[in-house]
Image: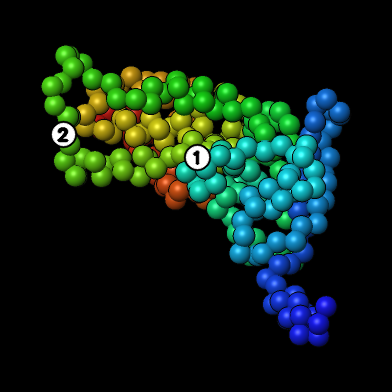
Amino acid sequence: MSTATLDKVEAESKASPYIKVTFRIRRFNPEVSAEATWQDFEVDIDPKERVLDGLHKIKWDMDGTLTFRRSCAHGICGSDAMRINGRNRLACKTLIKDINPAKPITIEPIKGLTVLKDLVVDMEPFFQAYRDVMPFLITKGNEPTRERLQSAEDRERFDDTTKCILCAACTSSCPVFWNDGQYFGPAAIVNAHRFIFDSRDEAGEQRLEILNDKDGVWRCRTTFNCTDACPRGIEVTKAIQEVKRALITRRF
C-alpha cells in the first residue's frame, strides 16, 4: 500500500463519525430461565443514528436471538415502544446523541404488560381495552349517500386524539396501570375521546358509560406520565380530564 493510500486511510479513520456505545439490554427467555438478566453489547455507531439502528446492529451482527418489535421505523406504527434510559420512547425516534452515549444506554420492555421474550410484551390486554371503548364511528339510520360532512371547528375539537398510534407508551407509563392491569389506561381513553367528541358519532353516551366503570376514567390520578411519554405529543391528561368533565356534565 502506497504512502498516499495509507495517509488517506488514516485521514478517513480520524474523520469517522462512529463512536463506541454500550447497549445494556434486559434479556428474558422463558425457555432458558424464569429470571431476566442484563446483557451488555459494545456497538460502533454514528451518534446521529437511532437506538433502533443500534438494536439492528446487535441482532444482525452480534446476537440473532435478541427479540424486539419494529415495523415502519419512522414513528408511525408504534411497534418499537420500549423503556430507554428509564423512559418510554420509540426506538426509531430516539437518537443516540440525545441520550448521553458516554454512559450505557439501558433498554428494557415497557412496564405493566407481561414480557414474552426480551423486549416483546403481550399487547393483548392493551388492545382489548382499546376494543372495549368501541373505537369506530357509530351512527343510526340508513347508510348515507354522500360523505358525512363536518366543519373545521367540529373536527378541531378532537384533532389531537386522532394522532394516537397505539404504541402503548402512555398506558405503560401509568402507575395505576402498573398496579392494576384492569384499568382501561390512557390510550383507550384517548381513543374513546376521539369519538365521544366527534359531531358525526351517536354513541358518545355508550362510551361514557363504559368509562364510568370502576376500572375506567376515574382511576386516573393525573400524574402526567402519559402526556410526557406520548411520542406524538398528544395532551393525554387533558383528554382524560375532558372525558371526566363530559361524564359529569353530559355535554360533549
Whether residue 14 is visible, yes or no, is no
The quadrant of the picture occupied by the C terminus is top left
**Residue under the image location 38 percent in, 22 percent down:** 134
The amino acid on which the numbered mark 2 sits, given as a three-letter code, is: Leu
Q: Position of residue 123 (x, y in %)?
A: 59, 28
Mark number, residue 77: 1
Query: Splitting the image into 4 quarters, where does residue 66 fall?
Result: top right
Residue 53 sits above or below residue 97 on the image:
above
Badge 2 crowding class, 10 Å Cα cut-off, few under 14, some 14 to 19, many 20 or more, is: few
Badge 1 crowding class, 10 Å Cα cut-off, few under 14, some 14 to 19, many 20 or more, is: some
Which residue sits furthest top? 142
Q: Which sits in the foreground, 29 or 174?
A: 29
- Secondary structure beneath dot 2 equals loop
Q: Position of residue 70 (x, y in %)?
A: 59, 40
Q: For mark 2, what is the residue? A: 149
**Residue under the image location 83 percent in, 46 percent down:** 39
- Secondary structure beneath dot 1 equals loop
Which residue sits furthest front? 2
- Lower position in the chain sequence, tag 2 or tag 1: 1
The amino acid on which the numbered mark 1 sits, given as a three-letter code, is: Cys
Residue 44 sits above or below residue 140 on the image:
below
Whether residue 131 is visible, yes or no, is yes
The quadrant of the picture occupied by the N terminus is bottom right
Q: Position of residue 124 (x, y in %)?
A: 58, 23
* Labels 2, 1: front one: 1
**Residue under the image location 62 percent in, 60 percent down:** 49
